[in-house]
């Protein structure tokens, strides 16, 4: 300490300044290396925070997975949006690698034209897009493999699915890390599995494609005596005219520990799709599901021939006007767009969903004396009522529904989880037993696990997703969480929690609201002045053109025949035009001034504020320590 006391204060200051500069850079370098994996997500919906479900999938990886991310730098140079998207994907995969403890290994490749990297990308099945007039291809895809050479790819990262990027990547990892998936048996007359016959081809419904990413899916016929033993969960959609034998098979399946996800409906709009693909016979009309006996044993019922209508959650639709009349935009109270306020946000099935669309759903009711526990998952708002199903048949009477709407002031139940103790719907055994139950018959269970939904149509693609064509490939872009609800419900019934977080995130490219407001204000402030200047400029150009024309047709002879006043007027007009263009440039530049100021402020806060605060804090600490030391020396 005596050494520092003997040093001149001026020299000490000269030494301190370079030391502070070195300390400034050292802190930055230390922060970049030490806290590189630490992220603070301040977005409204935590869009850049990896969900708990993803973490569980990554932490459960047992064998190494190699993820090869292919991105052509030339594609990013020609389309900066893709460069930004690539950084998002790369950073997310780097987080995945960290969370997995290195079990997920990320490799980056730049597949430029006529390189080995391009050949490998093509071999994996990745798609390229033309990036120049020479038809060179740019790539942005992912190829991942596990230790047993199973392979999953994203052929091209379509920007329309950027908000679903975590779902797509985690789905890929899950597919490679999970050797055996739970088996889902689908029992329905609806063509949800599609038709592979080229003559009557029908694509499978989008929710089936989605659950195949996580589960093994098999169809279950409606005329079998028992549910196959390898079925873990039965998905039953729009049950109608089921024989007593098949109802008994379903009953015993859940009595013996099987789980069921059941979709019933008071007005199944998709029922006509069950018609023969050859178009023979009369197509069925929308009708009501029939599972009264089983649902009664579970403690609930579908209210007969009634639809749930919700004015506060009604979807806006456009009705084609009659001849000589314009189309009408109105609320379709029986088409419900349920939001988080309608969900049980504490349940893993619905807790993270944003929107589920229903089309003329029925309503569930808990029966008096039910021994089961019925937990509402989705309900309407209080501005709801039950309306006759006849309003929707044979064609929906949308305006009449709205005109006749009278709120009942109570919520209506759309989806429920049913658990607990339940008696068999067939207390005397199978129908064939003739009153004497067989030894294998189970008359009661204390572990019923069923989820019932009062709408079948919510499964159909048109109510929750758009189909877009990208390079000959149909890409499904969801606008509602219907399929996510099905996946979450199945996963919850399967007893696993790992997939619940794999939801489609909201928009990751959120608008810069402050910037947009500044632009809007600047637009209002300066646009009128800009238009005024443009009008004056056009007038001046017109006057100049008239003056030049008055001098003759040959521009070379104009100056010779013009009078002095005309020449002076032309010169004044030219000067005025130059001045107007200058003012116009100033006004157009003013449109960006506030935004540039905001940009400078953000750069300062992002780059310099924290280091400056650290330096100021160090200076203050040094100052007070010096004051204390000086005070102590004076006292002594």
Image (cartoon, grey):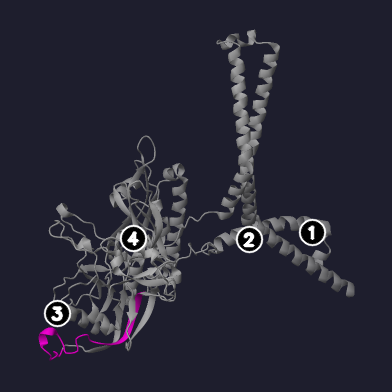
Query: CA–CA distance between discs 4 and 3?
Result: 34 Å
- Depth order, front residue of 255/502: 255
Q: Earlier in the sequence, mark 4 or mark 2?
A: 2
Q: Is residue 590 left or right of residue 265?
A: right
Bounds of the magenta segment: 414-439
Disc 2 designates what residue? Answer: 27
Q: CA distance from mark 3 to mark 2?
A: 74 Å
Residue at left offset 71%, top offset 58%:
19
Asked if the residue under mark 2 is in contact with the one under mark 3, i.e. CB atoms within 8 Å, the reply is: no
Instruction: Tell me whether circle 4 and circle 2 mark residues in contact (CB < 8 Å).
Output: no
Question: 388 or 231: nearer the eye?
Answer: 388
Mark closer to the chain start, 3 or 1: 1
- Residue 613 coordinates in the image, percent (x, y): 69, 61
Q: Is residue 377 left or right of residue 199?
A: right
Quadrant hosting residue 428: bottom left
Query: Badge 4 is on which residue?
Result: 463
Pair 4/2: label in front? 4
Q: Earlier in the sequence, mark 4 or mark 1?
A: 1
Residue in the image at 63% along x and 33% along y: 533
Task: From the image, tell me which residue sits under label 1.
Answer: 12
Disc 1 secondary structure class:
helix
Q: Please rate how many residues cluster around mark 3, counting C-alpha atoms within 10 Å: few if below 14, some from 14 to 19, many from 20.
A: some
């Amino acid at each position: 300490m005596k050494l520092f006391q003997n040093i001149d204060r001026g020299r000490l200051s000269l030494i301190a300044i370079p030391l502070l500069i070195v300390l400034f850079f050292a802190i930055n370098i230390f922060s970049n290396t030490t806290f590189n994996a630490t992220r603070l997500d301040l977005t409204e919906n935590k869009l850049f925070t990896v969900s708990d479900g993803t973490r569980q999938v990554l932490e459960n990886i047992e064998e190494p997975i190699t993820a090869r991310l292919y991105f052509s730098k030339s594609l990013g140079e020609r389309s900066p949006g893709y460069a930004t998207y690539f950084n998002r994907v790369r950073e997310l995969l780097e987080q995945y690698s960290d969370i997995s403890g290195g079990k997920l290994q990320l490799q980056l490749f730049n597949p430029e034209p006529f390189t080995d990297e391009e050949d490998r990308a093509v071999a994996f099945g990745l798609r390229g897009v033309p990036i120049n007039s020479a038809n060179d291809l740019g790539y942005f895809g992912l190829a991942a493999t596990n230790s047993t050479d199973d392979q999953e790819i994203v052929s091209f990262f379509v920007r329309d699915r950027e908000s679903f990027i975590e779902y797509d990547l985690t789905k890929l990892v899950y597919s490679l890390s999970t050797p055996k998936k739970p088996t889902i048996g689908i029992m329905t007359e609806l063509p949800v599995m599609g038709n592979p016959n080229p003559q009557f081809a029908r694509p499978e419904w989008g929710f089936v494609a989605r659950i195949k990413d996580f589960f093994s899916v098999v169809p279950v016929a409606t005329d079998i005596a028992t549910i196959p033993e390898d079925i873990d969960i039965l998905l039953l959609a729009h049950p109608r005219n089921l024989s007593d034998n098949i109802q008994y098979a379903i009953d015993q399946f859940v009595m013996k520990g099987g789980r069921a996800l059941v979709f019933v409906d008071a007005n199944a709009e998709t029922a006509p799709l069950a018609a023969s693909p050859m178009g023979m016979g009369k197509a069925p009309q929308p009708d009501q599901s029939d599972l009264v006996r089983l649902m009664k044993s579970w403690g609930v019922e579908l209210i007969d021939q009634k639809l749930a209508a919700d004015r506060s959650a009604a979807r806006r639709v456009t009705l084609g006007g009659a001849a000589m009349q314009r189309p009408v935009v109105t609320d379709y109270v029986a088409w419900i767009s349920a939001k988080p306020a309608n969900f049980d946000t504490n349940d893993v099935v619905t807790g993270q969903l944003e929107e589920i669309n229903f089309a003329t759903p029925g309503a569930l009711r808990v029966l008096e004396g039910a021994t089961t526990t019925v937990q509402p998952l989705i309900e309407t708002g209080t501005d709801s009522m039950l309306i006759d199903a006849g309003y929707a048949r044979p064609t929906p009477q949308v305006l009449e529904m709205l005109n006749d709407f009278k709120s009942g002031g109570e919520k209506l139940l759309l989806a429920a989880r049913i658990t607990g103790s339940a008696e068999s719907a067939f207390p005397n055994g199978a129908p064939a037993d003739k009153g004497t139950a067989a030894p294998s018959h189970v008359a009661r269970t204390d572990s019923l696990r069923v989820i019932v939904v009062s709408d079948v149509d919510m499964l159909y693609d048109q109510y929750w997703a758009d189909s877009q064509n990208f390079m000959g490939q149909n890409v499904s872009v969801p606008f509602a969480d219907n399929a996510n609800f099905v996946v979450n419900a199945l996963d919850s019934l399967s007893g696993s929690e790992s997939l619940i977080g794999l939801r489609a995130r909201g928009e990751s490219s959120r608008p810069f609201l402050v910037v947009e407001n500044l632009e809007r204000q600047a637009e209002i402030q300066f646009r009128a002045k800009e238009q005024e200047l443009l009008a004056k400029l056009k007038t001046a150009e017109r006057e100049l053109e008239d003056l030049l024309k008055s001098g003759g047709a040959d521009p070379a002879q104009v100056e010779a025949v013009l009078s002095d006043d005309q020449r002076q007027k032309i010169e004044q007009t030219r000067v005025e035009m130059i001045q107007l263009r200058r003012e116009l440039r100033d006004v157009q530049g003013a449109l960006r001034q506030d935004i540039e100021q905001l940009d400078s402020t953000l750069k300062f806060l992002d780059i310099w504020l924290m280091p400056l605060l650290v330096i100021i804090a160090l200076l203050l600490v040094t100052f007070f320590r010096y004051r204390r030391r000086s005070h102590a020396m004076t006292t002594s």
